[in-house]
Image: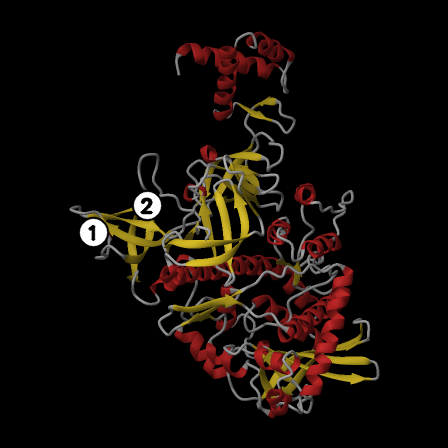
């Protein structure tokens, strides 16, 4: 900057320093400068320069104040388009960071930032001023060696990391073009210079079976193998149930009970029983007593806590516990005695739990049932299947009866059910997708879902009123601003929502979903409603579960695959055995904040990895259909094109650049693309015929074009 500019900066700064908020002298100066646009622009430039220097900052009221803005801390989350958000450590609303204000931060970095202007209709803006620590130290990607050069680059799989990583030849481990590698970052680059790293692992060639999924595993830093110490410990504790193990437990081995799971499930951690006494149902939800084999602070427990959850990828499961436990002694295998923690509930004809008991039990599962088999019995009335399980059919019919009662009661209180079709992948031995279809959500899956929900609510309410330290599964009330934006948007389609002052009821969202069911705009409105919600998480405080319209909720039913459930079982058993004294209460209070925070983070990591593997397999599956035509439904609209979903849940994009018959304008208020010359309209829910024109494994995208009408 020249000396004249610096002098003018000083004049403006001195004027601001005279009074804390924008003083009259400054306003007078601003009025004088309004005489010419150039002078107004110069003032703006001076103010921005002073702000960048940290000499002034913008208050919440939009006024300039002297001094440096208060620095706040948070984690930066980058978008694929350059901008991002800082997730604040106090749990308040995320802060929008424009691309030019990221300060060289990458996704996951812990940063210091200052608040800037408030923008109407979106998050408050901020500017990153310091990188406290880096979130990414390793990158997984594809190695490419430059022709004729002694160096190469790693092209990151993580598209939120915007730069290729320079790899000197001596740090490449001999990788060749096409290798999937893990690279450790040595520097994070600067303007005009790429980050630099060294290859630490060659995962395999991109064409080798399993390399694609293993790249995702490494990219999310998912632990795969258990140490020899942990495996040996699992072997030692995984002994058959003995008389000593059963001592002091409620023996219910004579009760008729079953497990109901998918055909390929191996870790069976819940069994159910149901009888009827008069007009009331006696429902037993029996959960594997994993804590009997995983002692607190043992090597197995520390590893389970670190992992937080089992991860279910397209072609493999990365378990939270060693298979010797998860598929062995902790699995409620039919025909074998097992230790359990049971929630036995008396439920009246209205679906209300009138009495319950939580007890340490010993059980004996009669039959290992599958969702498919129970569906055949109840929905298909399959004579052969009903004959095979004739002694169990009356219990299954009672289960259907109670399930419908429970589901009706939840619906009446406002529980929200987002019924998006999940994807079922069928792979061959080498991980190649053979078939992709919607996951069948039938009567059998709903029975188990309803019974597990009831047990979770019952246990949570019991321990809430005992005022003991506990782990709750919480879902906060959505931001009022987001719900009001949703209410405004749906008016375009003729729908309305009642949003009270400082009060948002889940029943209003449930009613909206019921109104849009089977309409063209159902997919869009359901997705927008879901995006307006906050994510569920684990907390040691009970704030209720908005989505389920439940005052009390926890995760009690899956201790084999979720650490919070294991932690809850430990608390319950201490309480049942009379060990919950002041020392134990103090112990749990001291650890639960960290346990719940870490478990929530590990859950997010697992979900993201699972989504990535499904997306990858969908792209791989569609590679064989390039050039072929399919029927689909327009599921999303943007200014750059429209998303089309096929019957098998696969979604691709028709980009506007591939809509060559006309120039299409995007009308955001109606979510429509309209031809400028032909007036042809494409709208949500419309059925169209598309042709597959591309499937990119690197970007994990599928491209369609509109097939010519016959």
Res 366 → quadrant: bottom right
Q: Position of residue 474 (x, y in %)?
A: 66, 58
Q: In this figure, which residue is indicated by the disc labeled 1?
A: 170
Q: Is residue 377 left or right of residue 678?
A: right
Q: Up-down: is 449 above or below 128?
A: below
Q: How many marks?
A: 2
Q: Residue furthest front?
A: 710
Extreme residue in the left direction: 148
* Residue 113 position in % (x across, y down): 52, 36
Residue depth check, mark 1 versus mark 2: number of the one nearer the observer: 2
Query: Is residue 561 or residue 233 the one in the foreground?
Result: 561
Q: Earlier in the sequence, mark 1 or mark 2?
A: 2
Q: In this rendering, does residue 250 appear at all?
A: no
The quadrant holding residue 668 is: top right
Marks 1 and 2, how far apart at CA: 18 Å
Count neighbours of disc 1 (C-alpha within 10 A) and say few if under 14, some if 14 to 19, many if 20 or more. Answer: few
Q: Is residue 447 left or right of residue 661?
A: right
Query: Would residue 225 be seen by someone viewing this image from the given angle?
Result: yes
Residue 132 is marked as none
Label 1 sits on a secondary structure element that is helix
Compare residues 619 and 78 and report the one nearer the observer.
Answer: 619
User: Could you tell me which residue is drawn at 73 percent across and 55 percent down?
Assistant: 511
Say above or below: 409 vs 166: below
**Residue 164, label in figure:** 2
Q: Quadrant of residue 92?
A: top right
Left or right position of 669 against 279: left
Element class at badge 2: loop
């Amino acid at each position: 900057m020249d000396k004249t500019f610096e002098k003018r900066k000083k004049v403006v700064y001195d004027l601001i320093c005279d009074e804390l908020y924008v003083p009259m002298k400054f306003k007078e100066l601003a009025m004088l400068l309004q005489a010419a646009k150039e002078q107004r622009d110069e003032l703006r430039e001076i103010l921005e320069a002073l702000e960048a220097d940290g000499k002034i900052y913008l208050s919440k009221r939009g006024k300039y104040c002297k001094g440096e803005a208060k620095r706040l801390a948070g984690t930066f989350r980058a978008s694929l388009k350059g901008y991002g958000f800082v997730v604040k450590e106090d749990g308040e609303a995320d802060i929008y960071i424009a691309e030019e204000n990221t300060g060289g931060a990458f996704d996951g970095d812990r940063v210091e930032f200052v608040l800037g202007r408030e923008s109407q209709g979106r998050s408050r803006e901020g500017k990153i001023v310091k990188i406290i620590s880096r979130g990414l130290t390793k990158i997984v990607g594809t190695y490419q060696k430059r022709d004729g050069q002694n160096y190469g680059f790693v092209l990151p799989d993580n598209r939120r990391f915007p730069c290729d990583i320079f790899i000197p030849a001596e740090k490449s481990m001999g990788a060749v073009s096409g290798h999937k590698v893990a690279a450790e970052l040595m520097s994070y680059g600067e303007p005009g210079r790429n980050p630099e790293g060294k290859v630490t692992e060659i995962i395999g060639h991109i064409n080798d079976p399993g390399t694609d999924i293993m790249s995702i595993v490494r990219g999310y830093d998912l632990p795969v193998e258990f140490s020899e110490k942990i495996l040996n410990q699992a072997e030692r504790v995984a002994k058959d149930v003995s008389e000593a193990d059963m001592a002091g437990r409620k023996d219910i081995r004579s009760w008729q009970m079953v497990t109901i799971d998918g055909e390929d499930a191996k870790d069976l951690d819940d069994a159910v029983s149901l009888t009827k006494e008069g007009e009331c149902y006696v429902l037993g939800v029996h959960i594997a007593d994993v804590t009997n084999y995983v002692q607190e602070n043992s090597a197995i427990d520390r590893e389970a806590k670190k992992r937080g959850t089992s991860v279910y990828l397209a072609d493999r499961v990365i378990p939270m516990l060693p298979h010797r436990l998860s598929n062995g002694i902790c699995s409620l295998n039919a025909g074998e005695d097992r230790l359990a923690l049971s929630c036995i509930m008396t439920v009246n004809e209205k679906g209300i739990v009138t009495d319950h008991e939580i007890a340490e039990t010993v059980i004996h599962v009669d039959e290992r049932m599958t969702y498919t088999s129970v569906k055949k019995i109840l929905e298909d009335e399959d004579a052969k299947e009903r004959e095979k399980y004739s002694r169990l059919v009356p219990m299954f019919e009672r289960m259907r009866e109670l399930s419908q009662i429970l589901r009706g009661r939840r619906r009446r209180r406002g529980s929200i059910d987002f019924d998006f079709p999940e994807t079922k992948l069928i792979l061959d031995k080498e991980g190649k997708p053979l078939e992709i279809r919607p996951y069948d959500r039938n009567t059998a899956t709903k029975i188990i879902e309803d019974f597990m929900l009831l047990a979770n609510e019952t246990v949570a309410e019991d321990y809430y009123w005992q005022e003991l330290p506990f782990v709750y599964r919480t879902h906060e009330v959505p931001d009022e601003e987001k719900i009001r934006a949703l209410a405004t948007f749906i008016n375009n389609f003729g729908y309305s929502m009642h949003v009270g002052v400082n009060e948002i009821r889940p029943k209003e969202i449930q009613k909206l979903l019921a109104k849009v069911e089977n309409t063209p705009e159902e997919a869009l409105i359901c997705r927008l409603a879901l995006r307006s919600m906050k994510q569920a998480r684990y907390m040691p405080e009970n704030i209720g579960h908005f989505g389920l319209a439940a005052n009390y909720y926890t995760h009690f039913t899956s201790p084999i695959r979720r650490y919070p459930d294991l932690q809850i079982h430990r608390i319950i058993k201490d309480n049942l055995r009379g060990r919950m004294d002041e020392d134990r209460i103090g112990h749990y209070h001291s650890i639960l904040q960290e346990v719940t925070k870490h478990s929530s983070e590990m859950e997010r990591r697992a979900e993201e990895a699972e989504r990535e593997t499904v997306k990858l397999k969908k792209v791989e599956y569609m590679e064989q259909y390039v050039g072929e035509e399919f029927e689909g439904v327009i599921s999303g609209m943007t200014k750059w094109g429209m998303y089309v979903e096929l019957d098998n849940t696969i979604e691709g994009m028709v980009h506007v650049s591939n809509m060559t018959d006309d120039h299409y304008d995007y009308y955001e208020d109606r979510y429509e693309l309209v031809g400028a010359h032909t007036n042809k309209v494409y709208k949500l829910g419309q059925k169209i015929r598309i042709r597959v024109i591309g499937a990119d494994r690197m970007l994990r995208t599928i491209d369609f074009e509109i097939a010519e009408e016959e």
